[in-house]
Amino acid sequence: MKKIVYFLILIILPISSFAQKPRRSQLYNEKGRLYADTTLKISPEQLHSWTLIEANVLGKLANSLTYPPASFRNGLHGKIIIALEYDNNLIKNIRVVSRKIGGDIEPVVIKTLEDNKNIILQEFKSPQTSIEVDSITRGTYFIPIVFQQLNFAQEVQKNHALPIIKVSNPIIIWITK
């Protein structure tokens, strides 16, 4: 009987460890550096907490953000990186740390994040992160946002077909190690 139990332990433990692959962030590399700007970094503790809530935070922000009509009409596109601080159960000091886009995009992004900071805060307090100590997840987090347009004529020329473009609900695909 002991041999069977040991055999099952030797078989089941390795299989269960494969089933629980760790999540990796879509925004930060394994050292906590932002892919969009590697000079911006979060701590290993922040990175661990962020990977637990990233998909929900990004999905909710993507559903809330809109392309400002004037910027869209003027063909403005580019990237903006927002910083926000999490401290003592507050989201505060939402600001732009990098901007490679003009027009009225910056105030629209800041207002959207300000309007949704309670939703972001709920993610930091969610059951999946409740085992975390507040002081571990405290700090500044960075969220890059890209505003992009497709040129209809160029897409027709490139694909030799009529492009029909629909954006799905934001889905984050987790990359595992």
Image (cartoon, rainbow, N blue to C red):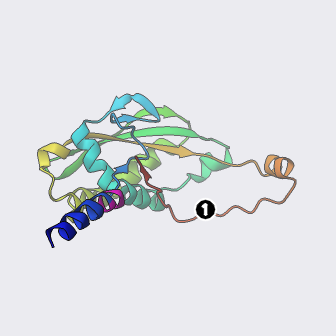
* Residue, disc 1: 167
Would you place residue 6 above or below residue 101 in this image? below
Query: Where residue 73 sits: x, y (%)?
Result: 67, 49
- Drawn side of residue 70 relative to residue 108, left or right: right
Name which residue lies at 47% across and 35% down: 36
Local SS, label 1: loop
Q: Residue at x 31, y 56 (%)?
A: 53
In the image, taking residue 132 as reference, residue 26 lies left or right, namely right
Question: Residue 139 lies in what quarter of the image?
Answer: top left
Task: Indicate whether residue 73 is drawn in magenta.
Answer: no
Residue 36 visible in the displayed image: yes
Q: Nearer the viewer, residue 45 or 9?
A: 9
What type of secondary structure mainly makes up the magenta span?
A: helix
Tell me which segment is drawn in magenta. 15-19
| Total tally of numbered discs in the picture | 1
- Looking at the rendered structure, the kind of residue marked 1 is Val
Residue 97, given in percent of the width and then of the height, sits at 39, 33
Q: Nearer the viewer, residue 110 or 70?
A: 110
Question: Residue 46, image x and y in percent?
Answer: 25, 42
In the depicted view, which residue is nearer to us: 155 or 173? 173
Disc 1 crowd rating (10 Å Cα; few below 14, some 14-19, many 20+) is few
Which percent across, then down, holds residue 170? 50, 61
Quadrant assignment for the N terminus: bottom left
Q: Residue furthest bottom?
A: 1
Residue 118 visible within the image: no
Residue 3 shown left or right of residue 160 in the figure: left
Q: Residue at x 86, y 48 (%)?
A: 157
